[in-house]
Amino acid sequence: VWARYRDGLAQDLAALDDAPDLAARVAEAEAGGSGIACFDAWACELRETGYLHNHARMWFASIWIFTLRLPWRVGADFFYRHLLDGDPASNTLSWRWVAGLHTRGKFYAAEAANIARYTGGRFAPDPAQLAEVSTGLEAEEPEGLPPVAPLRAPRAPQPGLPTALLITEEDCRVEDFDLSAFDLRGAATLSASHLRSPREVAPHVARFERDALADAGERAGVPDVQRLKAGGPSALLDWAQSLGAQQIVTPYIPTGPLGDWRESAEAALGAHGIALCELTREWDRVIWPHATAGFFKVKKKLPQILAELGLA
């Protein structure tokens, strides 16, 4: 699903270059100039604060897709470039759900009365401003979702080897892991928010990531934490070699732009005899296999999960 979104977004952005009218409408919507007061306020709030309430995110996405009839992936990209809590899974799958692509036969239609009620009257859009939605975008993906695949098995680190610790925005709780088994030679943070989009990512997102990584580095308790930027693997390789590290350990990196980066970095490091290894929690090992569709499958398994973790 991520690869389909990533490649589709590249095609959508290329198409904007050949469709100046559509590009102008996208720019107008992102700037808060659609003429729909609530939508325009949310566009400005997102750009200024990096945040929107969950209801506002759904209303915004629905209006973007069904009323303004703009490419859904470009809208998802607009969110991902500006949200402080931007997450490839949450953002991509939520936009797909609104569009009717993710749960077949279901889509989300923004309604004027619903907006007026749940904004406490702050907004009262004219119902005629919003499209009446009778179907989602299912025709765009007649093949539906791919089959559920097994979880990727990460390479486990080896105790005793000269080790470098890498901290990314995907998991800033490195103190959850017992690092005492490793011959830890040094640590670095890896900024990667610029990988979210081919377009420019909002400066406040980069600042938020920078400060979160710095805080995580302090809590890791490792002196002289270096700052790296995700790009070509040469900087990461040079840093690991300067420490004499034979493996780099990092909390598990899930699917998304940083996951794409991990694949190329793992190959480059391996060619020089350095393993890229990932740490996972017992919670993750037990819960993730049940997280295949929504929240309720996990909820039903909570007694089994608690028993397996010895918490029943």
Image (cartoon, rainbow, N blue to C red):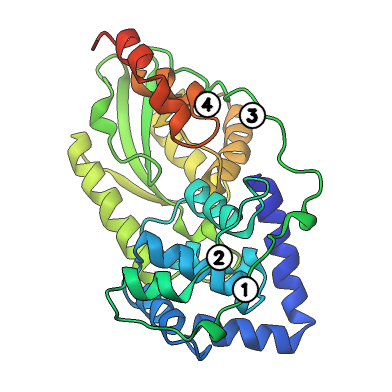
Distance between mark 3 and mark 4 Cα atoms: 7 Å
Residue at mark 1 to residue at mark 3: CA–CA distance:
56 Å
Q: What is the quadrant of residue 12 in the picture?
A: bottom right
Q: Are marks 1 and 3 in contact (CB under 8 Å)?
A: no
- The reply to whether discs 1 and 2 touch (Cβ–Cβ < 8 Å) is yes
The mark closer to the camera, 1 or 3, is: 1
Q: Residues within 10 Å of mark 4 (few under 14, many from 20)?
A: many
Which numbered disc, 2 or 4, marks the residue closer to the eye? 2
Which element type, helix, strand or loop, lies under badge 1?
A: loop
In the drawing, does residue 6 fall left or right of residue 94? Answer: right
Q: Position of residue 161 (x, y in %)?
A: 39, 15
**Residue 259, position as x, y percentages in the image:** 55, 41
- Give the number of the disc on residue 109: 2
- In this rendering, the label closer to the viewer, 4 or 1: 1
Residue 21 placed where, x, y %? 72, 89
Per the image, the residue denoted by label 1 is: 132
Question: First in sequence: mark 2 or mark 4?
Answer: 2
| Type of amino acid at the residue the image marks with label 2 | Ala
Q: Could you say which quadrant of the image residue 287 lies in?
A: top left
Question: For residue 281, what is the image quadrant?
Answer: top left
Q: Label 4 vs label 1: CA separation? A: 56 Å
| Residue at the (50%, 91%) spot, across then down | 35
Q: Secondary structure at mark 2?
A: loop
